[in-house]
Image: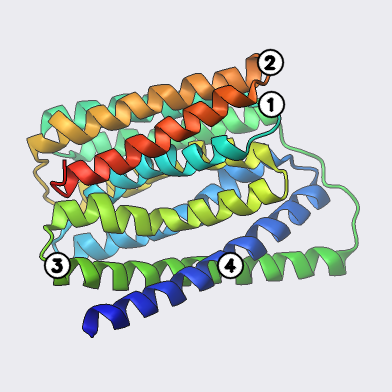
Amino acid sequence: MELAINLIQLLLGITILVWGANKFVDHSSVIAKHLGINDLVVGLTLIAAGTSAPEIFVAISAVINGNEDIAFGTAIGSNISNIALIFGVSCLYLNAASKTHLSNLLPFGISILMLGLIIVDGKISFNESVSLVGLFILFMYILLKTEGIPEEEKSESNALSKSLFLSSVGLVGLIAGANISIIFAENTALLLGISELIIGLTIMALGTSLPELAATVAALRKGRHQMVVGNIIGSNVLNLVFVLPIIGFFGTMQISQTVLQRDFYILLILSIAFVLLAIALTKLRFIKSLYIVSGILLIFSYFFYIATLAGIV
């Protein structure tokens, strides 16, 4: 009975989440058009920051309660699900090339390499945390340098104010829905006796990735493909440069070697695949069958990874 109640409340959270994502994507794009900002920049900054908020809130809560394993597992697991599940689903629906400045992939790649160094070290030091914050500054510098700071277009102030308000309402719904989903998904996992690291890598990671999934699906439905790539890049970078420093500055976590031997290498392989597909999407002729096959392989790899963590395979 308790499990059934948790599942019903989980569905309620997902419903709020999807509604919020639609409002947020719709009105973020309206704001972007008013300000002359293209969809890629919106995806890399506004939507990425908004949809990464659950991971950041989870990290703060976990560190306060001395559960750094959950925060770390959530950050790594969320990045894995962003690429394997969310980008995998996106690949099935892409129908046109997406122009992405390849320099935007530089902070993405550096963040993965820095994660590897941190894991080998076995802990997140103060200096490493500062370096990750510095990487965020580099990320924003490259973004502004490649995309430029647009001139504001003239628009009706009432329309812009309405979009700002509804975008904020959508973001609140998105984060609230994600938090409701996480709470009851975690309760369900605890009833089944799953460890904190596994909770972080699976239930919490998938729960905190629901905003990215909902925002990505909403963007795809509206044909805004640049938002899809930008959201994955922005969310994965922010998950590492914000969540890991929270642990490094305020926590005392010793990183399990299991993460190095299993989870990091999976994330590394998926990140390389994502970079190659993003480059192909920008530089090569669009071949839909390539992305359908890639999407199926990515989705399969995600469920195989989850099955491995669950001990099914």
Q: Is residue 287 above or below residue 251?
A: above
Q: Secondary structure at mark 4?
A: helix
Kindly report the distance in space between the C-alpha atoms of the residues bearing marks 1 and 4. 27 Å
Mark 1–mark 2 CB contact (< 8 Å): yes
Mark 3–mark 2 CB contact (< 8 Å): no
Task: Report whether 206 appears left or right of 119.
Answer: right
The image position of residue 119, as x and y in percent, is 17, 32
State which quarter of the image contains the C terminus: top left
Residue at 90% across, 62% down: 156
The kind of residue on which mark 2 rests is Arg
Residue at 30% across, 73% down: 184
- The residue carrying mark 3 is 192
Kindly report the distance in space between the C-alpha atoms of the residues bearing marks 3 and 4. 30 Å
The kind of residue on which mark 1 rests is Ala
- The residue carrying mark 1 is 97
Residue 285, label in figure: 2
In primary-sequence order, the first of circles 3 and 4 is 4
Q: Quadrant of residue 236?
A: top left
- The residue carrying mark 4 is 20
